[in-house]
Image (cartoon, rainbow, N blue to C red):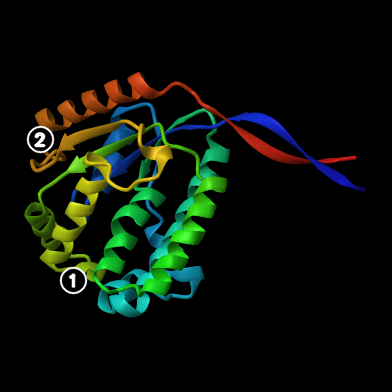
C-alpha cells in the first residue's frame, strides 16, 4: 500500500537542562531536584559509555586516557546515546516537566569544540562532527525551554573530582577543567557563536561553589530558584511532525 506524508501538531515535554563543568555537581543536583520538585529527571547515559553495547568496553575511560585517539568516537557516541535516551523518555513521559543532565548542545559548544581547539580532533573530524550535528539537531532535537547553569570555579570542580575518585577521571587535568569552564561561560553567559534557535533560550545561573548537598540553606535557595524558573518558562510548545499515512 502506498504512503504519503502529512504533518500533525504534537505536544512535546517541557524540558529544562542542567549544565555545568565536570565536578560542578550535576548528577547530585538532578537527584535533589527529583526529590524536591514535581519533575521527571533524565541522567546522562554513563552506563552506556562505560559498557558499550554490553561489550564491557569503557569508551569514557578510553577517551580520558587517550583523548586524541578517541575524542571523535566518544563525542559521536555521546551525542547518539543522549538523543536516543531523551527521545525514549519523552515518549514515556510526554506530559511531565523533564529535568535533563546535560544536552547535545554542551556536547557541541563545550566538549567537542574544546577537543578540536586542543588538537584532540583534527580539522576533518571537526567538520564532519559539525555537519551531522547540525542535521540531527535540526531534525530530531527540540528547542529546550531553559538551561540551568551550575556555575562553579574550575579549582573547586577539580577538588570535587579528586574527592570522588572516579576511575575514568583520574587523568583529567585542572587545565582541562579551566578550558571547559571558559567554553561554558562563552556559550551560556556570552552566547558567542551559538545557533539562532538557542539565542533566546533563557538561562538560570546558579552559583554552586558552596556545598548544596549538605547545606539545607543552599539547597533551599536553589530549589526555590529552579521552581520559579520553571514556572516562568514552562508554557507548552508544539512542533510539527511528519507522519506516514497509507493511501
Task: In this rendered view, identify the residue nearer to me: 146 or 48.
Answer: 146
Left or right of 164? Residue 47 is right
Q: Is residue 2 visible?
A: yes
At 18% from the left and 35% from the top, the residue drawn is: 206
Residue 173, quarter of the rendered image: bottom left
Alpha carbon of mark 2 to alpha carbon of mark 1: how far? Answer: 28 Å
At 18% from the left and 53% from the top, the residue drawn is: 181
User: What is the crowding at mark 1: few (fewer than 14 residues within 10 Å), some, or many (at least 20)?
Assistant: few
Q: Against 184, is 48 above or below?
A: below
Q: Against 207, is 184 above or below?
A: below
Left or right of 137? Residue 171 is left
Residue 142 in percent (x, y) is at: 50, 39
Left or right of 241? Residue 224 is left
Q: Is residue 80 visible?
A: no
Which residue in the protein does label 2 denote?
215
Residue 222 in percent (x, y) is at: 19, 30
User: What is the crowding at mark 2: few (fewer than 14 residues within 10 Å), some, or many (at least 20)?
Assistant: few
Task: In this rendered view, identify the residue nearer to me: 108 or 103.
Answer: 108
> Closer to the camera: disc 2 or disc 1?
1
Residue 239 in percent (x, y) is at: 58, 32
At 29% from the left and 75% from the top, the residue drawn is: 67
Q: How many marks?
A: 2
Q: Which mark is residue 28?
A: none
Q: Are marks 2 and 1 in contact (CB under 8 Å)?
A: no
Badge 1 element: helix
Badge 2 element: loop
Q: Which mark is residue 170?
A: 1
Residue 205 in percent (x, y) is at: 20, 35
At 30% from the left and 41% from the top, the residue drawn is: 18
Quarter of the image with the C terminus in it: top right
Query: Which of marks 1 and 2 precedes in the sequence?
Result: 1
Amino acid at each position: 500500500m502506498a504512503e504519503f506524508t502529512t504533518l500533525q501538531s504534537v505536544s512535546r515535554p517541557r524540558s529544562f537542562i542542567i549544565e555545568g563543568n565536570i565536578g560542578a555537581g550535576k548528577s547530585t543536583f538532578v537527584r535533589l531536584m527529583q526529590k524536591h520538585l514535581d519533575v521527571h529527571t533524565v541522567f546522562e547515559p554513563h552506563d552506556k559509555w562505560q559498557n558499550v553495547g554490553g561489550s564491557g568496553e569503557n569508551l569514557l575511560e578510553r577517551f580520558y586516557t587517550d583523548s586524541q585517539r578517541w575524542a571523535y568516537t566518544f563525542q559521536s557516541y555521546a551525542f547518539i546515546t543522549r538523543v536516543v535516551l531523551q527521545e525514549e523518555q519523552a515518549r514515556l513521559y510526554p506530559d511531565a516537566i523533564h529535568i535533563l543532565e546535560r544536552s547535545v548542545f554542551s556536547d557541541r559548544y563545550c566538549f567537542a569544540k574544546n577537543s578540536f581547539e586542543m588538537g584532540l580532533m583534527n580539522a576533518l573530524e571537526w567538520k564532519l562532527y559539525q555537519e551531522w550535528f547540525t542535521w540531527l539537531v535540526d531534525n530530531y532535537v527540540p528547542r529546550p525551554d531553559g538551561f540551568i547553569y551550575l556555575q562553579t570555579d574550575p579549582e573547586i570542580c577539580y577538588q570535587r573530582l579528586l574527592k570522588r575518585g572516579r576511575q575514568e577521571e583520574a587523568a583529567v587535568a585542572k587545565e582541562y577543567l579551566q578550558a571547559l569552564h571558559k567554553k561554558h561561560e562563552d556559550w551560556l553567559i556570552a552566547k558567542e557563536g551559538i545557533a539562532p534557535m538557542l539565542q533566546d533560550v533563557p538561562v538560570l545561573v546558579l552559583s554552586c561553589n558552596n556545598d548544596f548537598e549538605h547545606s539545607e540553606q543552599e539547597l533551599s535557595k536553589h530549589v526555590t530558584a529552579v521552581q520559579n524558573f520553571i514556572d516562568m518558562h514552562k508554557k507548552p510548545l508544539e512542533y510539527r511532525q511528519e507522519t506516514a499515512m497509507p493511501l
